[in-house]
Image (cartoon, grey):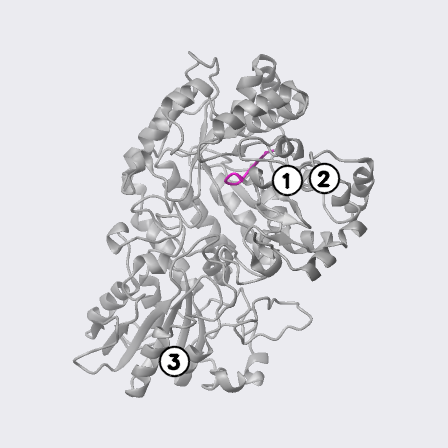
Amino acid sequence: MKTPFSLNKIARASLIASLGILAACSNDGTTTPEANNALSKTEKIWPKLNIAVKQDPEIEAKIADYLKTMTLEQKVAQMIQPEIRDITVEDMRKYGFGSYLNGGGAFPNGDKHATPMDWVKLAEDFYQASVDDSIDGSKIPTMWGTDAVHGHNNVIGATLFPHNIGLGAANNPALIEQIAAITAVEVMATGIDWVFAPTVAVVRDDRWGRTYEGYSEDPRIVRDYSAAIVNGLQGKADGDFLSDKRVISTVKHFLGDGGTVDGDDQGNNIDSEQDLFDIHAQGYVGGLSAGSQSVMASFNSWHGVKNHGNKYLLTDVLKTRMGFDGFVVGDWNGHGQIEGCTNESCAQAVNAGLDIFMVPTGAWKPLYENTIAQVKAGEISMSRIDDAVSRILRVKLRAGLFDKPSPAKRQFSGKTELIGAQQHREVARQAVRESLVLLKNKNNILPLDANQTVLIAGDGADNIGKQSGGWSITWQGTNNKNADFPGATSIYAGLEKQITEAGGRAILSVDGSYEQRPDVAVVVFGEEPYAEGHGDRDNLEFERGNKKSLALLKSLKEQGIAVVSVFISGRPMWVNSELNASDAFVAAWLPGTEGGGIADVILKAKDGSIQHDFSGKLSFSWPKTAVQATVNKGDDDYSPLLPYGFGLTYGDKNVLADNLDEDSKLDNSALTSMDI
């Protein structure tokens, strides 16, 4: 059995007693008097948020009217969210689920290449079944939730933006808001109402496989970005809030998923409550204040208590203290991980404050039936059910789902020209340019003259799936080909176009072989795609045990060819040897479908002028050893290879030596003179 922390860390977790909070929470999610007393202490930690979206008396009256007429069965159905692979249209007609989702790698008709119209048809069919009261007696519209985490990433042909780690390096909240607004439009073109974004994890251990879903190790960037993306997805509270061109947003995952011991996915966070707020809750301060209408509970535990069953966090802190009046949705059978629960039965989660069960894999029917039975047996109070349903209805009413046309008849539905529209791709290309961070530029080799012979090598050069990373069509981002990204541009294609237009020659050679000797080589390499779970690592060494990319770099260097490395990754990694073997080194993160943005920065214009300078800065500190996975700005022992905020621009003095394996030497005088 996998244990998320060692015995000595279990001893550290005994500090929980001094918190006087979790120890006072019983397993069924109820709160003891000791916990109520502790709440007053936490008022000094958790703020009462000034949430931009205020309650509307007219909407509250409608909620009360609905609750008076709904049966217990109808109420519980609002709290059940199955997955499209596990239900039929007839199931929706019979039960009237409040919502449903498509998980990563789930498509209409099970077809990866389903068209936007296929998505719209499924949305329309489920919607019409939900408002058909012939069987269940309910006409409450359902809503569809999807993981659109860097664009509408489940749909063939959609614009895929850089993953969050790259956007953090750009440090441009206005651009983030624009990206979110574009994502909302492409999502609505497929008839979908609700997006499971933004992720606001503040990552403390870069071994975590979801590191690239974090914007920064700095909570301030995460707070500002959270507000920006919520405004972009939903519209501003004093503007076009949840209008016909906006979708419901979800701030996730509550709480502390970026701070688990050893970066263990779904593991245990043992931070103090003050650190939980100061570090991990800042994204909620930003996103909830802006008016995000849903929060997703996290798989992780806090001091050994699973968040899906933690009444103190979900109810006392989030809802009561912070004032959140939307709904809390679970994560992929996360309720089943609570002690005493299964995927099919979990009164504890409801009592703790979970409003919607995300229940894929066919467990929805027994969960529905068991929840009804638990209410009848008094294990769950009717007041708790009514609170959950009130929150769900409040969001649906605010989003206008009772009044909007059906999905097929909405403003953007079926407008396939919006999926991957050129103007959307231009914004994504700008995001790529701004996300790039220049770590090394020996002898100012960059920017490159485009009118020369350029060898473009490495297995990432012409690989759109690799440059897009996880959560790209498929869940893990694997088993994709360039043809699965119509309209996209690989890094090679972007370089080749500009080099050719300038009168130069671009040679694509994955293994670095050539017939005509090049003037310079651009080598594109990095991590293979991954998502949660599969992306966890035990250290940060790149290509441990198989240094194929390093061998390619060294081979070119030994031939006297200058090397520019473009590194694709979902996190900072220990690449000292690769840095040594490179004349220039660009951290490109996971840029998405618009690889042309890299050419815009590293190549000169046809007339020899600079097109775009580097502006990206590290939003994650860069490690100097393979085991330095928890190096974060503000640490007492902070000693990275490259600090938070580092990033060269053209003309800056190069600071990285060529012998990093020997002593990781830096020109510290140059570093201190930089604005970092």
Report whether residue 290 is seen. yes
Chain-order first, disc 3 or disc 2: 2
Q: What residue type is labelled 3?
A: Ser
Dominant secondary structure of the residues highlighted in magenta in the image: loop
Chain-order first, disc 1 or disc 3: 1
* Residue 475, position as x, y percentages in the image: 40, 48
Per the image, the residue denoted by label 2 is: 321
279 or 477: nearer the eye? 477
At horizontal 61% and vertical 75% (from top left) the residue drawn is 639
Q: Which amino acid does label 1 sit on?
A: Glu
Q: How crowded is mark 1: few (under 14 residues within 10 Å), some or many (20 or more)?
A: some
420 or 296: nearer the eye? 296
Per the image, the residue denoted by label 3 is: 582
Per the image, the residue denoted by label 1 is: 339
442 or 500: nearer the eye? 442
Left or right relative to 528: residue 623: right
Q: Secondary structure under badge 1?
A: loop
Report whether residue 610 is seen. no
Q: Identify the magenta region.
A: 326-333
Q: In this view, does 400 lie above or below 612?
A: above
Look at the image and tell me in which quarter the C terminus lies: bottom right
Q: How crowded is mark 2: few (under 14 residues within 10 Å), some or many (20 or more)?
A: some
The Cα atoms of the two marked residues, 1 and 3, are separated by: 51 Å
Q: Secondary structure under badge 2?
A: helix
Left or right relative to 664: residue 475: left
Q: Which of marks 1 and 3 is in front?
A: 1
* Residue 125, position as x, y percentages in the image: 35, 25
